[in-house]
Image: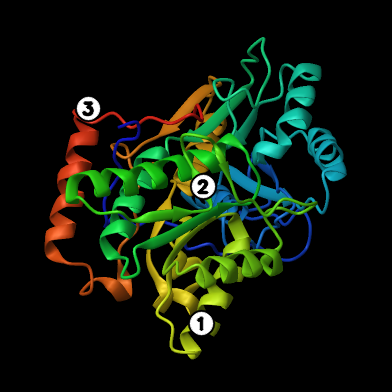
Amino acid sequence: MRGTVKTVAALSIAAVLAAGCAKPAKTTSTSTAKFLGCMVTDTGGIHDKSFNQSSWQGMQNAAAAEPSKISVKYLPSTSSADYAKNITAFEGEKCGIIVTVGYLMAGATEAAAKASPHQKFAIVDCSYASACLSKPVLHNIDQLVFNTVQDGFLGGYLAAGMTKTGVVGTYGGAQFGTVTIYMDGFWDGVMYYNKEHHTHVKVLGWDEQTQKGVFVGGNNPFGDPAAAERITNLFISDHADIIFPVAGGDGLGTAAAIKTADASGKHVYMFWVDTDGCISAANYCQYMITSVTKGLAPAVENAVLQAANGNFKGGTYIGTLKNGGAVLAPFHDFQSKVPTTLVNELNTIKTEIENGTIVPQTKSPV
C-alpha cells in the first residue's frame, strides 16, 4: 500500500484571516518600525479565504508580535505579469524580507533573488526538492512547504469512514505538486480504509497510481468558483457525497453546489483545504466535516520574525503532522456525528505517523 496515513482531528490552524485593507501595499504596525516585511499575493487575492489570506495573517502576526520593530505591507497580483513588478517595487522600498505566495511565483522570485543576492525572500508552497525552484540553490530564499500527504491521508480515511454512498471525490485547481500531494494522501487514505475494513469506497477525480484526475485549470485555476461548482455537480451526479476541493477559493463553488444539493434533499458534505474552513468560510461550516490544513500563518510569521531579528538562514521549513504544520482541523458541527471508533482509528494512525511507524508517501516531493 503506497500511501500512509494522515493526521487527526483537532488541531485548529490559526487562520483567523483578518484580511488587510483593500488598498494595495497596506501597512500595519507603527510608522517608527525599523523592519519592513513585504508580501506579494498570488492572483487569488488577499481575500481568497485560503493561502494568500492565511499568509497575510502570518505577516500581521509578526507585526503584532514586535510592533515597535516590524511593519508589514502587501501588494496584490491580478495576473502573473504583476509578480515581477510587485517584487521590484518592494525591492525599491528596501523591504527586510519579501514573501511571495504560491507555486506560480517561483520564476519571478528566483530571478529577483539571483539579481539581488542580499535581498531576503521567502516563498510559500515552493521548494527545490519539488523542482518548483531550479538549482543551483540560492541561500537568500526561505522555502515554506508542508507535507500535506499526512493530513490528506487522514482526510481520505475519514471520508471513507463517513460516506453513505460509497463514493467520494477530490479535484485540484491545477496539477502542481503542492496540489496533488493532498490528493495523493486523500486517495491513499481511502484505499487504506478499504483495506482495513474490507470496503470498496470509490474516489472520483484522482488516481494516485496513474496521477490522472480532474483540475479547474484555465487562466485563474484557484479563483474560478463557477468551474468548481460545475465539477462538484458532476461528482454529485455520480453519487459522491463527500468532496475535497484542493483549489483555494474555488472551494466556494463546491460549497455553493452542496448548498443547492442540500436544498433538494441530497446529503452531500465537503472538506476545506489549507485553512480551517469553518473560520475562513464560516457561512458554509454546516457542510464541512473537517479541513485538511497547513500551518501557513505560523510559518510566514516565523520567517518574518527570523529575518527581523537577524536569524534568517534561507533553506527549507517543512510543516508536518508532528510540528503542527499539517493537521486536520476540528470537526466543528460534525463533532458529535463522527463515530467514536473512527476517531480512535484516526488517533492511532496519527500517533503512528508521528513516531515513524507509518511513513506517508506521495509522488509529489515536498
Classify residue 276 as left or right of residue 135.
left
Quadrant placement of the N terminus: top left
Classify residue 220 as left or right of residue 250.
right
How many C-alpha atoms fall within 10 Å of the one at disc 1: few (<14), some, or many (≥20)?
Answer: some
Res 166 → quadrant: bottom left
Question: For the point 66% across and 23% down, which residue is it?
Answer: 133
Q: Position of residue 128 (x, y in %)?
A: 59, 20
Q: Position of residue 93 (x, y in %)?
A: 80, 38
Q: Position of residue 64 (x, y in %)?
A: 50, 53
Identify which amino acid the numbered label 2 is placed on: Trp
Res 53 → quadrant: bottom right
Residue 200 seen in the current view:
yes
**Is 230 rendered above or below residue 303?**
below
Q: Which residue is mark 3?
A: 356
- For label 3, the SS is loop
How many C-alpha atoms fall within 10 Å of the one at disc 2: few (<14), some, or many (≥20)?
Answer: many
Question: Going from the N terminus, do you reach mark 1 or mark 2 first?
Answer: 2
Identify which amino acid the numbered label 1 is placed on: Ala
Question: For the point 29% across and 51% down, which residue is it?
Answer: 157
Which label lies toward us, 3 or 1? 1
Tell me if label 3 and label 1 are in contact, CB under 8 Å. Answer: no
Residue 36 seen in the current view:
no
Question: For the point 78% across and 63% down, which residue is it?
Answer: 23
Q: Which residue is mark 1?
A: 261
- For label 1, the SS is helix
- For label 2, the SS is strand
Q: Which residue is mark 2?
A: 206
Question: Going from the N terminus, do you reach mark 3 or mark 1 first?
Answer: 1
Identify which amino acid the numbered label 3 is placed on: Gly
Question: Going from the N terminus, do you reach mark 3 or mark 2 first?
Answer: 2
Residue at the extreme top of the image, as rendered: 136
